[in-house]
Image (cartoon, helix red, strand yellow):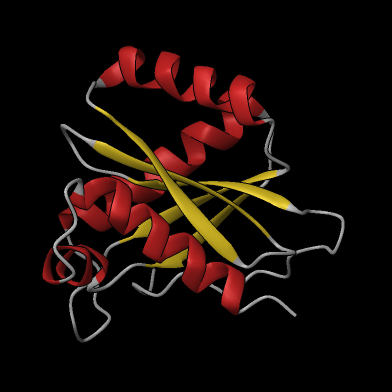
Amino acid sequence: MSGQPAPAVVPAHLQSFLAFDYGLKRTGVAVGTRMLRSATPQGTIRAEGDARFAQVAERIREWQPDALVVGVPLHPDGAAHENTARALKFARQLRGRFGLPVFEVDERYSTTEALSAGAADADAASACIILEQFLRNLP
């Protein structure tokens, strides 16, 4: 497997998205729409295992997104590392549990960018950066 997620075609009927910046202890969350091409941070999920998925389910019920977006971390040279596999597993689990389309986005430097911008919640800010990058690349 190459470290780089394959670009996916995003059907035009998918308009609203819930994005995740996956981490072992914290998962940043953001919502956004194709029309506005912007994202809004949501409260970070501070849970692991099934407790994390219970909180993800609450967010999906609240926002009713058409699809989900997961940031996939890579080394600067694009190579995969331990957290790459964890994020890809999280994306597969989301597909299986919620039956929504899930898109993977290269999220190199999103947390660094969030921290350098002075974000109070770097995980949620990183999820916003991931989602806005995804939305900017839509046709």
Classify residue 45 by image quadrant.
top left
Classify residue 2 by image quadrant.
bottom left
Q: Which residue is drawn at 48% across and 73% down?
A: 133
Q: In this view, does 131 lie to the left or right of 116?
A: right
Position of 7 relative to 128 (above/below): below
- Towards the viewer: 56 or 24: 56
The quarter of the rendered structure image containing the N terminus is: bottom left
- Towards the viewer: 70 or 83: 70
Q: Residue at x 19, y 52 (%)?
A: 122
Residue 48, given in percent of the width and then of the height, sits at: 23, 22
Position of 28 relative to 113 (above/below): above
Q: How many labels does the image show?
A: 0
Q: Residue at x 32, y 13 (%)?
A: 51
Q: Residue at x 49, y 60 (%)?
A: 131
Q: Work out which residue is located at the far right of the displayed protein and give it.
A: 13
Q: Is residue 102 left or right of residue 108?
A: right
- Towards the viewer: 30 or 119: 119
